Amino acid sequence: MIWDLFLIAVGLGLLVVAGDALVKGAVNLALRLGIPALIVGLTVVAFGTSAPELMVSIAAVLDGAPAIALGNVIGSNTANILLVLGLPAIISAIRTDESDTRESATIMIAATVLFILICFMGPIRWPHALVLLGALALILSRQIREALAHRAERRAADEEVEAADPKMPGWKIGAFIAAGLVGLPFGADFLVTGASSIARSFGISEAVIGLTLVAVGTSLPELATSVTAAMRGRADVALGNVIGSNIFNLLSIIGFAGLVGPLPVPEGMLHFDLWVMLGASVLLLPFVFYRWPITRGIGIGFTLIYAAYVVVLMAGGTA
């Protein structure tokens, strides 16, 4: 038990550090190769920040624990809305009128519905995975076209890209990329091994472990960023990040994991967890479309709903 918890802690630490290193290295390499910063922000940064979840899901499939991969994505998307937005809102109300996320939120709902339909066609195999990745490619190509069309208006965004350092030497870029590529698979393997062992020890299904422990663990970077932003009075930055992260989780992570191996969908996920994820996504819509602020009271409500969801899972509410 202690060893398993140690593996989980080390795995999470490696995922956070290696993921950050990969983003830094990949962003600066792309800029060095002459790729426009705007495109780097929409693609390289987005994929890089999803790398920990992606590696965990692929490792879970390779280790014969596909339920952890599915639980990681479904649980992360639920936690992103109820926890990653709920806790910062308790610190400082989240304003939703400072940026227009209506189109992104609509895409998130569409991606969620598509994902649910594919789950009911399960097990998820490579043809389903290609559908998800195709949807992601369409979304990215549209975003890139729109960004390039409004490039003059977005000059500031073109100059400021997360983790960009124009003075970073080539050897350092290589070191960051190497550290990320080496650390991510090790971290993912440690996390999945420890989580699977705990699931077997306590008789808890791997699906529940993926939906709770693994999902929250891989969402910790987003949660830490959101709480820090809230403490600085900028909790609003979390909204766009959560919506974008949820889209990527559904389309890219399960898309790539489905290419590695089949992902059978447990009955409990079909009848409960998928609908909780959809419900949490729909719950966000009034705040996006009507620009209602996510107040402290709403934040407490979101957090309590998530806590109740975890209690139901642990009590055997899903198979």
Image: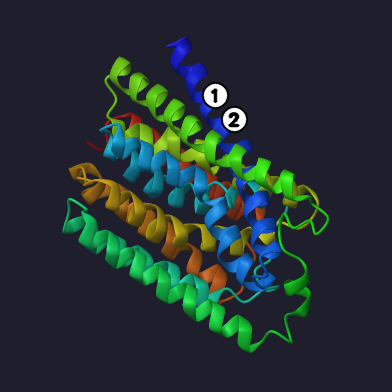
Near-viewer residue (138 or 30): 30
Q: Which residue is mark 2?
A: 13
Identify which residue is drawn at 70% across, 48% down.
173
Residue underneath mark 1: 9
On screen, 127 above or below 6?
below
Q: Looking at the image, do the residues carrying marks 2 and 1 touch, with CB atoms under 8 Å apart? A: yes
Quadrant for the C terminus in the image: top left
Residue 141 percent across, percent down from the top left? 48, 77
Tell me the quarter of the picture where residue 290 sits.
Answer: bottom right
The image's colour scheme reads rainbow
Q: Could you tell whether 271 is left or right of 312 in the image?
A: left
Instruction: State how far apart marks 2 and 1 are (Cα).
Output: 6 Å
Which residue type carries mark 1? Answer: Ala
Q: In which quadrant of the rendered image does the N terminus lie?
A: top left
Query: Residue 136: where, in percent of width, then height?
Result: 41, 68
> Between residues 64 and 274, which one lies in front from this camera angle?
64
Q: Residues within 10 Å of mark 2 (few under 14, many from 20)?
A: some
In the picture as drawn, the residue positioned furthest to the front comes out as 171
Tell me the element at label 1. helix
Q: Amino acid at mark 2?
A: Gly
